[in-house]
Image: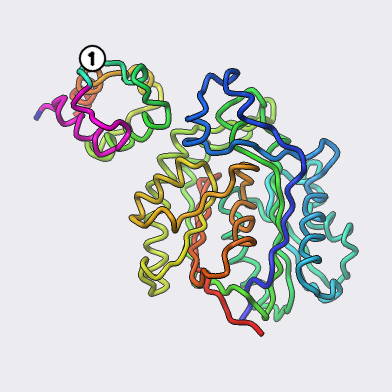
């Protein structure tokens, strides 16, 4: 079972960190659209809970868009 | 029944204005206002020691309520930034500065942001077991002693302050059952570095811990006290940051007007953050949940019920 970009969008939506995640493309840099470090922490917490995985601090900095997040999670599952 | 009779507080006059440091830290005003929430942080003067902060809080307590200092049976100081290197214990220094009687016992407890809740449980148990009538729980943890002013993870958040909570049998607030916890595997999330004795904090670890563990702890504590969450008038949670308070409010599923954030003008005062708010709480609140969480990782909560006094 592969994780999709839509699943990540749903998690972003439930995190309430941006008003409409459907408007961001898969390769949009999340930092560049104003998502700050604390929102990012919240997003990764939701992802960890949802997929029951642990994302180490060292990996967080490079997970900057939905594509990268999807690839990363699929490599962990 | 031993409970809280009155709370004295002390905030040093000094302030660091965080709005003047936005460019330096590369953040905008919205982040400061909505995420950290601390527009200013209180800072003690360099010659003020931890015991001096306690003495100032005690002076404020004396202004609020009459009591005979010779009737104080015990004092406890909660701090992880004691006078000098913690030897002698800061409570002994405070005892000396206040010229308390020899029969008054004094000891320190080493806890951070969970310290007031733990301390309340400790001092009540200690007093009840020893048949004491009056005791004072001090909280004073001046992080300015160990903060690197250039580290935005901590420098924008923590402020200095102290409180002195008088415990006795003419209580305004009575605590219910406590629910306390520790996750020692996370002890490196907030720590003093060995090499330079400077504070460092992993903000992500602290945020994740806070917003997941604390709501569960509060819900379990309420069950233990046979209280429905809707019966709670107000939640006085440790003032970690405005963002943590917001997430805790969401995760508890309660109205945001029931969860207070009051640290805009002085910052996160560690174990003093909860009593700072309790002191100025609106008289309309009758059932109040308090919850402390942080260094350790350590956490605890209880419910306070207001008593009708003459």
**Magenta stretch contains residue A14:** yes
Helix, strand or loop status at disc 1: loop
- The residue at which mark 1 appears reads as A27
Viewer-nearest residue: B127 or B287: B287
The furthest residue to the left: A1
Please determine whether, in this image, residue B121 is positioned above or below residue B53: below
Specify start and end residues of the magenta stretch as a single range.
A2-23
Q: Residue furthest bottom?
A: B310
Q: Is residue B148 above or below residue B46?
A: above
Query: What secondary structure do most residues of the magenta stretch adopt?
Result: helix
Q: Is residue A30 magenta?
A: no
Give the residue displayed 47% in from the left and 59% down from the top. Answer: B235
- Seen at 57% across and 49% down, the residue is B262
Q: Is residue B46 above or below residue A56?
A: below
- Colour basis: rainbow
**The C terminus of chain A sits in image quarter:** top left
Residue B131 figure quarter:
bottom right
How many numbered tags mark residues here? 1
Report the side of B107 relative to B119 (left or right): right
Chain letter of the residue carrying label 1: A
Say which residue appears at 61% left-offset and 65% top-offset: B120
- Judge left or right: residue B119 versus residue A27: right
Q: Position of residue B217 (x, y in %)?
A: 41, 58
The spot of residue B178 in percent (x, y) is 50, 66
């Amino acid at each position: 079972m592969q994780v999709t970009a839509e699943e990540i969008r749903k998690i972003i939506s439930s995190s309430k960190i941006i008003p409409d995640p459907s408007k961001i493309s898969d390769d949009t840099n999340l930092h560049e659209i104003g998502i700050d470090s604390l929102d990012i922490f919240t997003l990764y917490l939701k992802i960890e809970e949802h997929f029951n995985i642990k994302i180490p601090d060292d990996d967080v900095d490079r997970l900057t868009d939905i594509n990268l997040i999807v690839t990363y999670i699929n490599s962990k599952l | 029944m031993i409970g809280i009779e009155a709370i004295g507080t002390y905030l040093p006059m000094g302030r660091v204005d965080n709005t003047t440091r936005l460019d330096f830290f590369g953040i905008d005003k919205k982040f400061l206002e909505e995420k950290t929430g601390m527009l200013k942080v209180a800072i003690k003067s360099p010659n003020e020691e931890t015991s001096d902060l306690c003495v100032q809080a005690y002076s404020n307590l004396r202004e609020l309520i009459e009591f005979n200092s010779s009737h104080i049976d015990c004092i406890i100081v909660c701090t992880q930034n004691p006078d000098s290197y913690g030897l002698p214990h800061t409570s002994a220094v405070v005892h000396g500065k206040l010229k308390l009687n020899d029969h008054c016992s004094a000891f320190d407890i080493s806890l951070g942001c969970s310290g007031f809740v733990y301390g309340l449980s400790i001092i009540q148990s200690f007093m009840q077991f020893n048949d004491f009538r009056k005791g004072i729980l001090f909280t004073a943890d001046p992080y300015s002693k160990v903060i690197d002013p250039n580290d935005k993870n901590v420098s924008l958040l923590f402020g200095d302050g102290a409180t002195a909570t008088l415990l006795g049998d003419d209580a305004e607030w009575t605590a219910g059952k406590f629910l306390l916890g520790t996750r020692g595997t996370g002890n490196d999330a907030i720590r003093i570095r060995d090499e330079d004795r400077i504070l460092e904090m992993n903000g992500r670890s602290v945020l994740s811990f806070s917003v997941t563990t604390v709501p569960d702890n509060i819900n379990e504590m309420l069950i233990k006290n046979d209280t429905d969450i809707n019966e709670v008038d107000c939640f006085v949670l440790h003032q970690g940051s405005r963002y943590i308070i917001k997430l805790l409010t969401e995760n508890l599923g309660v109205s945001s007007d029931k969860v207070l954030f009051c640290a805009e003008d002085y910052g996160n005062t560690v174990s003093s953050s909860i009593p700072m708010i309790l002191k100025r709480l609106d008289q309309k609140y009758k059932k109040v949940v308090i919850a402390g969480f942080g260094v350790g990782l350590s956490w605890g909560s209880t419910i306070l019920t207001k008593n009708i006094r003459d």
